[in-house]
Amino acid sequence: MNLSHESPKRSPRMKATIGDIPKGIVYGNALTLLLIFLLVAVCLVFLPYPYGGGESILHHIFR
């Protein structure tokens, strides 16, 4: 695993073709995934289970 902050080793020709990935795109994608995960978690906690008589989806799963 490459733990340094350098980009992966690529040939000069490949690096010239695709370049480096901008940090904004990387952080934006990570933030988007985090928001989607949090949205799903909130839905599990607060949305009622359709056949559960008012219990949440999370409560129904762990009952």
Image: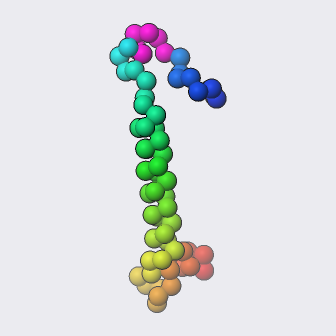
Q: Extreme bottom residue here?
A: 53
- Nearer to me, 25 or 49: 25
Residue at 49 percent of width and 53 percent of height = 34
Across and down, in percent, residue 17 comes to 35, 16
Residue at 43 percent of width and 37 percent of height = 24
Please say whether residue 9 is visible from this viewpoint.
yes
Across and down, in percent, residue 29 comes to 43, 44
- Nearer to me, 51 or 24: 24
Q: Is residue 2 left or right of residue 50?
A: right
Q: Is residue 14 above or below residue 35?
A: above
Q: Extreme left residue here?
A: 17
Classify residue 63 by image quadrant.
bottom right
Quick check: is 12 in the magenta stretch? Answer: yes
Q: Main secondary structure of the magenta part?
A: helix
Classify residue 47 by image quadrant.
bottom left
- Nearer to me, 43 or 25: 25
Residue at 52 percent of width and 74 percent of height = 45
Q: Extreme front residue here?
A: 24
Across and down, in percent, residue 28 comes to 43, 44
Quick check: is 35 in the magenta stretch? Answer: no
In the rendered image, which quarter contains the N terminus?
top right
- Nearer to me, 2 or 55: 2
Please say whether residue 49 is visible from this viewpoint.
no
Classify residue 48 by image quadrant.
bottom left
The magenta segment:
10-15
Q: How is the image coloured?
A: rainbow
Q: Is residue 55 above or below residue 5?
A: below
